C-alpha cells in the first residue's frame, strides 16, 4: 500500500510533465511553422548550384577581393581634421566644482533633514510603549487561589523579590470600610482577597520585613509598624505602606502593575482592626 502511494503520484507527475512538453512543442510549431523533409535535408547537406549557376566563391577568390579592396583604400587621400572655431581655454574651477553657496545650501538642508529625522525618532520612541520586564512592568504572579495558599503557607506574608512586593490576604468583612479609603486600583485586588504592598518604608525607604509573631510589618530602621494590610499602627512613618495597582483577569490571575505605586492610607486608618497577635520583633518607637 505504501509503494502504491508513492508510485502513483510519481507517474501522475511524469504524465503531467509530458503533456506540458507536448503542448509547448505544439505551440512552437504553430508559431514558427514546420519545414518539409526535403528542405531539412538540403540544409543538412548544403545547397548544390544548378546547371549554369555560379557556385559560392572559393577561398582564393575571397582573399583576392580583400587585397584589391585594401589597395583601393590606400589610394584615397587621408582626411585632414579641420581646426576648431574657438581656441581651447581651461574651465573655471568654481564652475567645475561645487561653489561655496551650493555647499552651504546643501549643508543646511542636510542638517535640517538630520534634525527632523532625529526629532521624529524621539517622538516615536516616546509614543511607543516601552518593553519592560521585572520591576516597573505588569506582573502576572499567579491565580488568586494559588496566591492565597502560598500566603498561608508563608505564615501570612508572601515576599516576591521580582516585584519588590509583599502579598497578603485582605479580609472580606473589611471591604465596606476599605471602599471609603482606597482607590479603585487598590480595591480591585482587595475585592479578590489580596493586597500587593511596596516593601519600602514610606518614612526613609528602608525595606520593611514581616514579623511573624506579631503578624505585622515592622521596620528595623526607625521602628515604624504596619498591620498585615500595610496600614500604619506606630512609629514615625507619615502614612501606611504604599500599594501597587492590581487587577484580576478573566482567567482568575492576579496582575500587579509595579510601575504604578499608590500612596498608602493616611495615619489613623485601620479597616481590618487587626491588633498585634504576639510579641513585636522591633522595639517601640515614638512618633
Image (cartoon, helix red, strand yellow):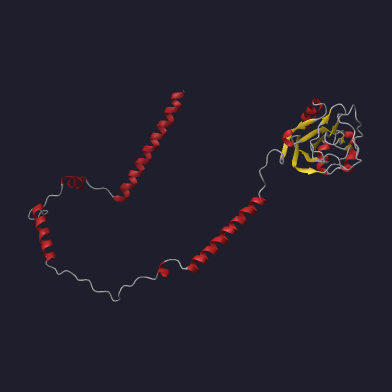
Q: Position of residue 18 (x, y in %)?
A: 36, 37
Question: Which residue is painted at 78% across and 27% down in the image?
Answer: 150
Using the image, determine if residue 171 lies above or below residue 182: above
Using the image, determine if residue 209 lies above or below residue 48: above
Closest to the observer, 97 or 130: 97
Question: Which residue is painted at 56% across and 61% down in the image?
Answer: 111
The residue lying furthest to the left in this view is 52
Query: Which quarter of the rendering shows the C terminus?
Result: top right
Q: Residue 249, can we see it?
A: no
State left or right for residue 179 relative to residue 72.
right
Residue 195, image quadrant: top right
State left or right for residue 151 relative to residue 274.
left
Residue 161, image quadrant: top right
Residue 155, image quadrant: top right
The residue lying furthest to the bottom in this view is 85
State left or right for residue 160 relative to residue 119.
right
Q: Position of residue 278 (x, y in %)?
A: 90, 26
Question: Which residue is painted at 22% across and 47% down in the image?
Answer: 36
Q: Position of residue 190 (x, y in %)?
A: 83, 37
Q: Position of residue 209 (x, y in %)?
A: 81, 32
State left or right for residue 60 relative to residue 89.
left
Question: Which residue is painted at 82% across and 31% down in the image?
Answer: 210
Closest to the observer, 125 or 28: 125
Amino acid at each position: 500500500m505504501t509503494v502504491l502511494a508513492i508510485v502513483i503520484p510519481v507517474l501522475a507527475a511524469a504524465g503531467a510533465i509530458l503533456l506540458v512538453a507536448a503542448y509547448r512543442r505544439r505551440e512552437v510549431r504553430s508559431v514558427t511553422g514546420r519545414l518539409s523533409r526535403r528542405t531539412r535535408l538540403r540544409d543538412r547537406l548544403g545547397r548544390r548550384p544548378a546547371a549554369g549557376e555560379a557556385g559560392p566563391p572559393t577561398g582564393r577568390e575571397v582573399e583576392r577581393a580583400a587585397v584589391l579592396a585594401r589597395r583601393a583604400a590606400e589610394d584615397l587621400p587621408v582626411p585632414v581634421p579641420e581646426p576648431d572655431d574657438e581656441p581651447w581655454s581651461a574651465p573655471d574651477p568654481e564652475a567645475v566644482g561645487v561653489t561655496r553657496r551650493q555647499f552651504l545650501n546643501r549643508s543646511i538642508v542636510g542638517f535640517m533633514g538630520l534634525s527632523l529625522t532625529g526629532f521624529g525618532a524621539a517622538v516615536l520612541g516616546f509614543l511607543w510603549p516601552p518593553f519592560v520586564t521585572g520591576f516597573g512592568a505588569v506582573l502576572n504572579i499567579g491565580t488568586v487561589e494559588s496566591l492565597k495558599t502560598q500566603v498561608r503557607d508563608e505564615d501570612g506574608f508572601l515576599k516576591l523579590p521580582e516585584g519588590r512586593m509583599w502579598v497578603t490576604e485582605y479580609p472580606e468583612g473589611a471591604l465596606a470600610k476599605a471602599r471609603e479609603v482606597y482607590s479603585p486600583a487598590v480595591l480591585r485586588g482587595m475585592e479578590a482577597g489580596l493586597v500587593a504592598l511596596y516593601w519600602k518604608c514610606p518614612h526613609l525607604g528602608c525595606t520593611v520585613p514581616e514579623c511573624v509573631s506579631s503578624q505585622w510589618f515592622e521596620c528595623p530602621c526607625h521602628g515604624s509598624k504596619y498591620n498585615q494590610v500595610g496600614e500604619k499602627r506606630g512609629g514615625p512613618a507619615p502614612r501606611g505602606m504604599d500599594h501597587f495597582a492590581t487587577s484580576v483577569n478573566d482567567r482568575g490571575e492576579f496582575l500587579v502593575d509595579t510601575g504604578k505605586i499608590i500612596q498608602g492610607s493616611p495615619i489613623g486608618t485601620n479597616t481590618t482592626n487587626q491588633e498585634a497577635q504576639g510579641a513585636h520583633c522591633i522595639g517601640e518607637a515614638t512618633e
